[in-house]
Image (cartoon, coloured by chain):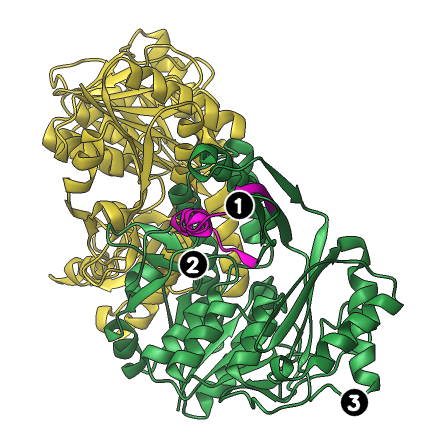
Chain colours: A yellow, B green
Amino acid sequence: MLIVQKFGGSSVADKEKIFNVANRIGEQYEKGNKIVVVLSAQGNTTDILLKKANEINPDANKRELDMLLTTGEQQSVAFMSMALQKLGYPAISLNAAQVGIHSSSAYGKARIKKIDCNRIISELDKNNIVLIAGFQGINKFGDITTLGRGASDTTAVALAAVLSANFCEIYTDVDGIYSGDPRMIKHAKKIKEIGYDEMLELASLGANVLHNRSIEIAKKFNVALIVRSSISKESGTVVKGVSKLENTLIRGVAIDEDVARISIVGLEDKPGISFKIFSLMAKENITVDLIIQSIGRNTTKDISFAVDKSELKRTIEILEENKDYITYDYLKFEEKIAKLSIIGAGIASNTWFASKMFEALYRANVNIQMIASSEIKISVLIDIEDIVKAANAVHDKFLSENLIQE
Amino acid sequence: MLIVQKFGGSSVADKEKIFNVANRIGEQYEKGNKIVVVLSAQGNTTDILLKKANEINPDANKRELDMLLTTGEQQSVAFMSMALQKLGYPAISLNAAQVGIHSSSAYGKARIKKIDCNRIISELDKNNIVLIAGFQGINKFGDITTLGRGASDTTAVALAAVLSANFCEIYTDVDGIYSGDPRMIKHAKKIKEIGYDEMLELASLGANVLHNRSIEIAKKFNVALIVRSSISKESGTVVKGVSKLENTLIRGVAIDEDVARISIVGLEDKPGISFKIFSLMAKENITVDLIIQSIGRNTTKDISFAVDKSELKRTIEILEENKDYITYDYLKFEEKIAKLSIIGAGIASNTWFASKMFEALYRANVNIQMIASSEIKISVLIDIEDIVKAANAVHDKFLSENLIQE
């Protein structure tokens, strides 16, 4: 079998953990499998580098940031290669330029366009374990890009897709996907198997176990994912196949604290306004979420949406620079908020889900600032102070009524 | 003018030093010059990475070590680019793969074979300050090599050569080349100008200011070097042109503590023996120095030579593996030694230099273990305990007789 394995930064944070992972890799190799391993930077390496960069230049050029940050993953694969060789396994490390992981040029959030398989296949044919630096790509200029925080998952799944791997194991510090973040939701339950679409909602709503773009790629190329612990040998959660749309249970509760709300107040109430705003955002590669447009008052309307906290400053700058082009009265923003979501394939067709969620929030005395729903999720923005209380209240409500599917 | 500047690791060790260097670079840029800057890894980054690697695998594969160590220089250039941009200067960082610094495949001590100028020239044409990671190359497989410790100088001079730069400034933590290491030789004097050959001897004999391969390249392509301080604005030492062979003064005293002696005892006294030994050393990329062959006793002879301390273990292994091929009785080695040299273009033609050196050592009660001389140097191996005393005695002797040229 050909297996792609991905280990996160906390799994390779120090020498002992590196050897723990090297042993896990070795076990699969000894069974006669061909192994491709994707690694993140060790522990908090990326944060330390970001902090240093920020001290030098708080508005550091994204190209230079990517040049800097990608060294963390390159160090990880070199260390792991040395550890595997120490244990007697043949191994070789490769960075994105060496593999040929071609990406777009959007530094800091590039997208993978094409992966060359020749070098990897030739190393696998020499019976090498192939260690690949996650999170990075090269663009058409030969410059180094990063694929966004947490995108080592994306690297792993994309490699599994182009190499037609039998499956892709995502090793992490939890032993699977839970119906809520176990660090915050007291009664969270482990999910045995989940479809791509539901997993996609869980991920994009803040369940940090899998990067959402990795799930999109897995879905597109039908790559079976296994999310499991790098420490324990428990079976983990399998992500594959389609969601059952007729389902009448929810899959879990997700929390996203990395969100900010921005409102553009006093827009002219005429066609084309939202196009102007969101094409600007798209051009600047800012991901927006939870777009809500107020009903027009007199001749004006308001548009509110959510962005990542880290993008708030730049979003405001862009909107202010384009005030004359968009034409509005003023901007409002709020950083002390969090997003709470419930996910389940049957949500759109069953109003009871929304009703039960709002009831739980009401009983917990939590005020709802914004609401958005889709086919398979309902999200609310609430005060960040209330998030743990609110998430537990909602999760307990669905659990007590046996409405969470394992 | 087109200027290549090189700053060592201690010059970019922290934020403050990075900005100090960025200001120095900016000054030259503002005069309308085109600037290419080569940087080493920050402070003791390389040592820290080496230590971590050694903890994971003391016999780490050299390819993987190079993969690891080159991240230090990549971080330096990214940080410097951010600092320059913060100061308002346009800058871009490039690693060896991006420039196209093609090298041999001898990981850990690769040689530069060819440098592509297109990317650099195109960035200079956009008025960018171009920051290039020193110490690294890529081989024909696209894999990352390093050019040996201290080889960022080599990168800088090679770039100056291929770009036909007007000159190459080597910034360091001392303000020029001295007639002896000022940290050890009390009365050391700064040299204003020195020829390539004499500088080559000074460097290869342990004056750590310039990497000797960088001087070889500078000589070959006639690149004028300026060695100066990254802190002070003093004029430094110019390295260029030919040595005056009729000179009757010495240029300085050099110390090399990173040396070990090895003796092969009881070799057959027949032709081809030294060829066997040194072709083995060459094949394994071990640099040898101070080769001395004893006069044959009966039917056997001994060969002694010096290697870097770090190569001693491997040298012994190679010689032991090939004992039957070379045929000898046994090996002897000594690590607690150091090499003391005097350098000057007129040494070969004037026996007084050797005589004065040996007199000074005799008066200082220092025992000489081995002697070797060339056209422009005399080196002795002595007990490492005696080195500072011996170096000062020799330097003072020549100084007192007005035999050191400034």
Is residue A191 visible in the rendered structure shown here? Answer: yes
Q: Quadrant of residue A94?
A: top left
Are there few (<14), some (14-19), or many (20+) residues within 10 Å of tag 2? many
Is A195 or B161 nearer to us in this picture? Answer: B161
Q: Where does label 2 land, which residue?
A: B147
- Mark 1 or mark 3: which is in front? 3
Q: Is residue A95 left or right of residue B166?
A: left
The image shows residue A337 at horizontal and vertical percentages of 44, 42
Secondary structure of residue under mark 1: helix
Spatial CA distance of label 1 from label 3 is 46 Å
Q: Quick one: quadrant of the N terminus of chain B?
A: bottom left
The image shows residue B268 at horizontal and vertical percentages of 51, 42
Earlier sequence position, callout 2 versus callout 3: 2
Question: Label 1 is found on which chain of the structure?
Answer: B
* Magenta-drawn segment: B263-290
Q: Amino acid at mark 1?
A: Leu
Q: Where does label 1 land, which residue?
A: B49
Q: Amino acid at mark 2?
A: Leu
Is B279 magenta? The answer is yes
Earlier sequence position, callout 1 versus callout 3: 1
